[in-house]
Amino acid sequence: MEELENVLNNLKTNKAPGMSGISYGFWKKSKNLTRQILLAIINESMEKENVITDWKKETA
C-alpha cells in the first residue's frame, strides 16, 4: 500500500485524465477504501499476469 500511496500522492493534478476518464485529482483525493480496492485490482492483475489492456495503452 505504501508504494501505491507514494505514486498517487506524487501525481500531477494538472494532467488530463487517461482513457478511464478519471482525473489524477480524484486519485490524489481518494480515501483509503478506494485505494485498497485499486490495490486489490492491481495485485490480482499482476498475480494472473493479465494486465488490463487500457493500462498497457496508458504506459506505451
Image: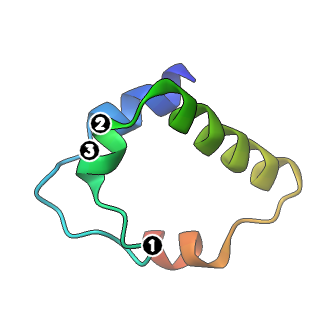
Residue 13 vertical placement versus 58 (above, below): above
* Dot 1 crowding, Cα within 10 Å, few <14, some 14–19, many 20+: few
Which x, y percent locates residue 48? Answer: 89, 56
Which x, y percent locates residue 20? Answer: 45, 72
Please name the residue that numbered disc 2 is placed on: 29
Give the foreground label among 2 and 3. 2
User: Is tag 2's residue or tag 3's residue first in the polypeptide sequence?
Assistant: 3
Which x, y percent locates residue 9? Answer: 30, 32
Question: Is residue 21 found left or right of 12 in the rendered image?
Answer: right
| Residue drawn at (36%, 72%) of the image | 21
Please name the residue that numbered disc 1 is placed on: 20
C-alpha distance separating marks 1 and 3? 16 Å
In the displayed orientation, state which residue is furthest to the top: 2
Question: Is residue 40 found left or right of 24 in the rendered image?
Answer: right
Please name the residue that numbered disc 3 is placed on: 11
C-alpha distance separating marks 2 and 1? 17 Å
Type of the residue with mark 3: Leu
Could you tell me which secondary element the residue under label 3 belongs to? loop
User: Is tag 1's residue or tag 3's residue first in the polypeptide sequence?
Assistant: 3
| Residue drawn at (84%, 59%) of the image | 49
